[in-house]
Image (cartoon, rainbow, N blue to C red):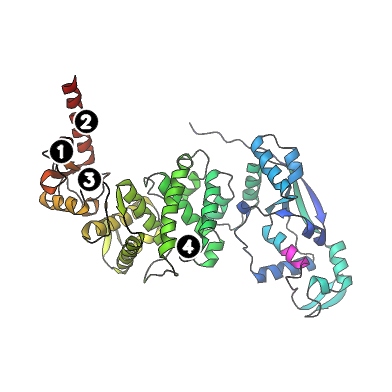
Amino acid sequence: MKKTKFFTDIDSEQKDVPLDVLSKKKIYLDERFQSWARWLLKEEVYYAGSILLGKASSNIVLADIQQCFDNSENLADSMYYSRLLEQGYQYISVDGNNRCTTIRKIVDDKIEFEYGHYSINGKVFQINKHNSKWSTMDATLKSHILEKKPLRVEIITRATNADLADEFLRINNGVKHNPQEKRNAKYCDIADAVRDLAKKYEKVLKLFIELPHLKRRKGDEVVAEMIIHGATDGSFMNLSKGTLDSEYDDESITTKSLKKGIVATEKTLKLLKNYQKSKLDFDAGKPFTAVLNLHMFVVWMDNNNIAYSSGKKFYEWWLKGERKRRKSKDFVAEVGDFVATYTGLQKYKTELYLNYRMNKMKQDFAEDENAPIDFRDAERIFSKSQRYDMWIIQNEKCAVTGKKIPVQEINDASKWSGDHYPILHSENGPTTVDNGRLIEYEAHKKITSNQQMKSVTRMS
């Protein structure tokens, strides 16, 4: 049954606040409601001019922390507001982070008003290099701004933490915030985890993503994809907008395994931090897609008990392969009218596209005898080269069901198992090509189950 949504109202009041008074307030810029310092200098100067001309008409929305704390009805909200009060904050900026930052810069003389002639209240004022800052501005003009051009502020006095996020999204419903900026405003554990990792590995993400896109939380989106994929052991092969939107919820599959997703994501990001020392580019395709590609491959390795002894050698091998794959003009996906090169597959993150990306990486691994990675537990698990030899001997088919084994799936233990035969491993059968076969995973489960039942029967 679909969960019924529950909505709550908030209390707020409108106030006209002089610029200098607002600048002195200690306002908490909640990262849920901002994308780094999104305004450039030209936008800040333009807003300063709007204040001067009395054209800064859109409301700044702040939450009064003390009043929200006094009106809070649950422990989580009380703790959130209490923590901010202890840090000396008076308000939370719900909508207007850039404006609040700009106002503070104006009063601190970090922004100059644009030079020119301004007709204010029937009188013309000239602003030039001698009086373009707040501290040097004509006293009459400054008084006019403070007394006649206050800023319109909406003060929220009763709201839960979740209400503030909902208020931000509703205010900005018609604003061009990208999908990740909207997800970022949600009050949930995965949003916090994504922000924390994106900030922690900011220098790494800068090597793959251009700064303007980072400022719009593209790095957060990449990290979100990685966490979701890792938390689900790689089972989520559709990382398009719909998936990310639905997983940003405290009841989602990802949230239930969030720690696992964080650990998997950090493993990949640490590889990049240690061995990718300069800005990455390719002959074709956007560099940031390589982060998810590497992550998918590392998660697949972990799921299949495959490891590398040298992170440096592994990453260099993988990156060399990624460059080669992106240069190739060969089609790696052909289904009906759908054909695509590996580079073409970087365009979307639907299940079809990601599976083809993954299959190509697995195929390259299967065909490369010198890949610096291999299976763990060498005494029991067949090596990559042994699985390949068995595949050749079996004419590329399962030794039990006769199903064809695609080359890119030779080393995929979730689909094809290395089976000790004719001498079982439990009977000290050697892990060799002569005593092994590659069989379908489900067939191997049935064989193992039958063997266990026989063993129990003998014991009884």
Circles 3 and 1 in contact, beta carbons < 8 Å: no
Relative placement, left or right, of 317 versus 444 is right
Real-space CA distance between mark 4 and mark 2, rounded to the nearest whole angstrom: 46 Å
Q: Is residue 103 magenta?
A: yes
Amino acid under label 1? Asn
* Residue for badge 1: 428
**Whether residue 435 can be seen here:** yes
- Indicate the secondary structure of the residue bearing disc 1: loop
**Whether residue 173 can be seen here:** no
Real-space CA distance between mark 1 and mark 2, rounded to the nearest whole angstrom: 18 Å
- The quarter in which the C terminus is drawn is top left
Q: Indicate which disc, 3 or 1, sits on the residue closer to the N terminus.
A: 3
Question: For the point 66% across and 70% down, which residue is it?
Answer: 41
- Indicate the secondary structure of the residue bearing disc 3: loop
Q: Please report the bounds of the magenta region as a residue range.
A: 102-114
Circles 1 and 4 in contact, beta carbons < 8 Å: no
Q: Indicate which disc, 1 or 2, sits on the residue closer to the N terminus.
A: 1
Amino acid under label 2? Ser
Q: Position of residue 286 (x, y in %)?
A: 42, 66
Question: For the point 59% across and 44% down, which residue is it?
Answer: 187
Front of the two marks 3 and 1? 1
* Residue for badge 2: 449
Amino acid under label 4? Val
Question: For the point 51% across and 54% down, which residue is it?
Answer: 197
Q: Indicate which disc, 4 or 2, sits on the residue closer to the N terminus.
A: 4
Q: Residues within 10 Å of mark 1 (few under 14, many from 20)?
A: few
